[in-house]
Image (cartoon, helix red, strand yellow):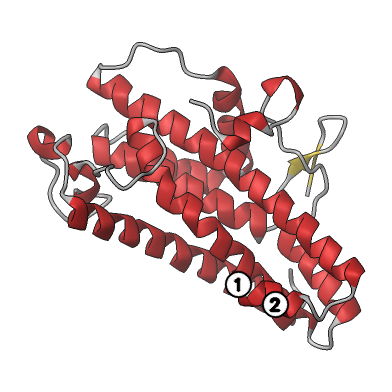
Amino acid sequence: MSNSRKRDDLQPVVRGALKALDEDLRQLLLTYGDTTSHLCYFSLHDKLGDVDVKVDENRVNLFWEWCDLHPTTCEHFRDLVTQHTLPSIFRAYFDVYVEMMAALGIRRIARHDANGKRSR
Amino acid sequence: MVKEADEEGSPGGHYKIKNPTSTTVFDQLVEIGFKHKADGIAWAKAEMEGMFKHCLRAVRNWPSWAYDDQKMNLSWRAPMLLLMEPVGREAFDHGRAMERMDEAGTSKVIDSLADYAVRRLRERLELAVRGRISGSS
């Protein structure tokens, strides 16, 4: 990748910082991608009535914690989900997933500190 | 479902926001950019775009996980519901929603979802860059 080649010109400390940021973002996106796809799967198949497996509560909690911090995205999600069609459910979770990617990478978001308090 | 995020998640298998700081990856890139490059924001933007390119593979895998709880592979075929509103442009037809597309249709719809994600991320990045330049971020 061209970015990696460009990084060869950077000081080792900068290359290290970039590698750490890359890894942080990758892990965050994996976690949230996994959470949204898991919940979408259960919502779709719950509607179809062909899955009888309990949804992972940890993922549910993380999802709503995130939505709680992003009211506009949450409102959009609820609007789509309440349409109660399979495509609207898929769209709702996919849009949240993309918004999560943007928020985690770019937008300043509120997060919990070590004591569970929110900060911006 | 076993995925990389499960294996490398936080202890006890609980999903928590890992980084307790208030800065985003882009914020940190800008900071590094200012310290080490003449044009810190442009450099940070280019790096952020590079990082998001890595994420595209995950976006392309997302639909197969979301519909079939399985990793994307060459034999996976997308359900027709991905062509229907509000994902696609066709009217919703419950009877056809679970039918599968062919290979070309699957590829097209995955490309379309990935393109959408890229557009959204670029829009957000542009806003963040403008905010930084104007000093309002």
**Dot 2 surroundings within 10 Å: few (below 14), some, or many (20 or more)?**
few
| Residue at the image point whose x is 74% and y is 72% from the top | B136
Q: Quadrant of residue B70?
A: top left
Apparent side of residue B39 relative to residue A60 in the rendered image (left or right): right
Q: Nearer the viewer, residue B6 or B16?
A: B6
Instruction: Give the residue number, with chain letter if any, for mark 1.
Output: A1
Instruction: Give the residue number, with chain letter if any, for mark 2.
Output: A5
Q: Nearer the viewer, residue A103 or B44?
A: B44
Amino acid marked by disc 2: Arg
Percent coordinates x, y for residue A49 in the rendering: 25, 16
- Determine which of the numbered discs, if any, sits on residue A97 in the image: none
Q: Residue B33, can we see it?
A: yes
Return the chain for callout 1: A
Percent coordinates x, y for residue B38 in the rendering: 84, 88
Compared with residue A50, is residue B116 higher up or lower down, i.e. above or below? Answer: below
Q: Residue A81, can we see it?
A: no
> Marks 2 and 1, how far apart in space?
7 Å
